[in-house]
């Protein structure tokens, strides 16, 4: 059963086609990542799903309620937790006052446990909060009424690495409880840790919906090598090597050897390293490819809107 279902969902502002004919589903109980560079159209999709803006064409259902049925959508929101990319809390209010307001509107079954986990400074006014503290308070307000579906727009923005890890563990435990999670992100490492499937959006259009393993295979790794002795360029002339940069001389008469290079690799890392078994490497680093590089390499260039 689908918790969210989009069918041809489109938002056309005239000068900007923010979402173009989006069709996909989010299954009940899965963690679905909505992935794309900033400005790709992720927030527009979320705002249509929640009824904040009306689609130009197409439709969608959320928890089996049509987004075109305004009364049903208001009712179903009691079962949804939502964290926007900018929570917009009243800066004159304290954290406690914000929680009390949310509790009066949608109930409070879990705030005590959530406060222990995320620990925002409730006695301070929001105007004195850091970006990370605003986000931690937002996470408490999102989950405090024990929703069955949560929609998160860039949920880890401003969080420090320790809190990001804590949030990831919490989200996995929520999934084990049966909660469906739909979250947008432009951070590939978040998606790797958390998602079952991903939908990739570029310039308002859906590029693909895939299991996260497929995305990771395609995104590859950024590899940097530093060799003790000059290496021939053909040692990296293998399938899976993209965007090679090296300190080999540009002189056509030179032999093309290098001691340092960097490239994106989408093959088997063990097979790559075997290429250098007869060479002495001073340093090797292997990192996740930045999402922007993934889009440039595999999805046709930079985003528009």
Image (spheres, grey):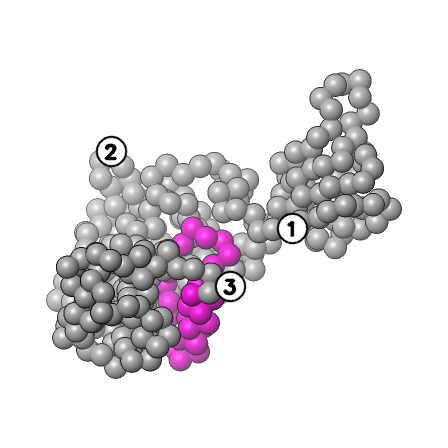
Residue at 40%, 54% in the rendered image: 185
Figure check: 127 above or below 38: below
Indicate the quadrant where residue 160 lies: bottom left
State the residue position of label 2: 15
- Magenta stretch, main secondary structure, is helix
Res 5 visible: no
State the residue position of label 3: 193
Mark 1 secondary-structure assignment: strand
Q: Nearer the viewer, mark 1 or mark 2?
A: 1
Q: Position of residue 101 (x, y in %)?
A: 15, 70
Q: Position of residue 241 (x, y in %)?
A: 67, 41
Mark 3 secondary-structure assignment: helix
State the residue position of label 1: 286
Q: With 277 as the anchor, is 189 left or right in this view?
A: left
Q: Which portion, as a residue range, is magenta?
A: 163-190
Q: With 179 as the anchor, is 111 left or right in this view?
A: left
- Sequence order check, earlier mark of 3 and 2: 2
Residue at 39%, 59% in the rendered image: 159
Residue at 34%, 59% in the rendered image: 132
Q: With 157 as the anchor, is 72 left or right in this view?
A: left
Neighbor class of circle 1 (other Cα within 10 Å; few <14, some 14-19, many 20+) is some
- Image quarter hosting the C terminus: top left
Q: CA distance from mark 3 to mark 2?
A: 37 Å
Q: Nearer the viewer, mark 3 or mark 2?
A: 3
- Check if mark 1's residue and mark 2's residue have beta carbons within 8 Å: no
Neighbor class of circle 2 (other Cα within 10 Å; few <14, some 14-19, many 20+) is few
């Amino acid at each position: 059963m689908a918790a969210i279902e989009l069918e041809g969902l489109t938002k056309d502002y005239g000068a900007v086609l923010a979402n173009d004919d989006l069709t996909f589903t989010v299954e009940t109980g899965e963690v679905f990542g909505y992935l794309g560079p900033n400005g790709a159209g992720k927030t527009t999709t979320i705002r249509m799903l929640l009824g904040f803006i009306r689609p130009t064409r197409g439709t969608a259902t959320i928890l089996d309620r049509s987004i075109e049925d305004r009364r049903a959508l208001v009712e179903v929101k009691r079962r949804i937790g939502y964290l926007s990319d900018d929570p917009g809390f009243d800066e004159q209010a304290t954290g406690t006052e914000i929680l009390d307001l949310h509790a009066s509107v949608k109930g409070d079954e879990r705030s005590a446990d959530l406060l222990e986990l995320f620990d925002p400074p409730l006695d301070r006014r929001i105007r004195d909060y850091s970006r990370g503290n605003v986000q931690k308070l937002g996470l408490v307000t999102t989950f405090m009424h024990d929703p069955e579906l949560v929609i998160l727009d860039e949920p880890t923005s401003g969080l420090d690495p320790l809190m990001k890890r804590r949030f990831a563990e919490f989200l996995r435990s929520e999934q084990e409880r049966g909660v469906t999670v739909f979250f947008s992100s432009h951070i590939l490492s978040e998606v790797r840790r958390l998602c079952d499937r991903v939908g990739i959006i570029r310039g308002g259009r859906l590029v693909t919906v895939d299991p996260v393993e497929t995305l990771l295979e395609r995104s590859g790794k950024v590899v940097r090598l530093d060799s003790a002795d000059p290496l021939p360029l053909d040692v990296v002339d293998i399938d899976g090597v993209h965007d090679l940069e090296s300190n080999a001389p540009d002189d056509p008469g030179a032999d093309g050897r290098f001691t340092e290079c960097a490239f994106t690799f989408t093959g088997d890392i063990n097979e790559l390293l075997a290429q250098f078994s007869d060479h002495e490497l001073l340093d090797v680093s292997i990192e996740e490819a930045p999402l922007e590089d993934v889009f440039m390499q595999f999805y046709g260039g930079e985003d528009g809107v």
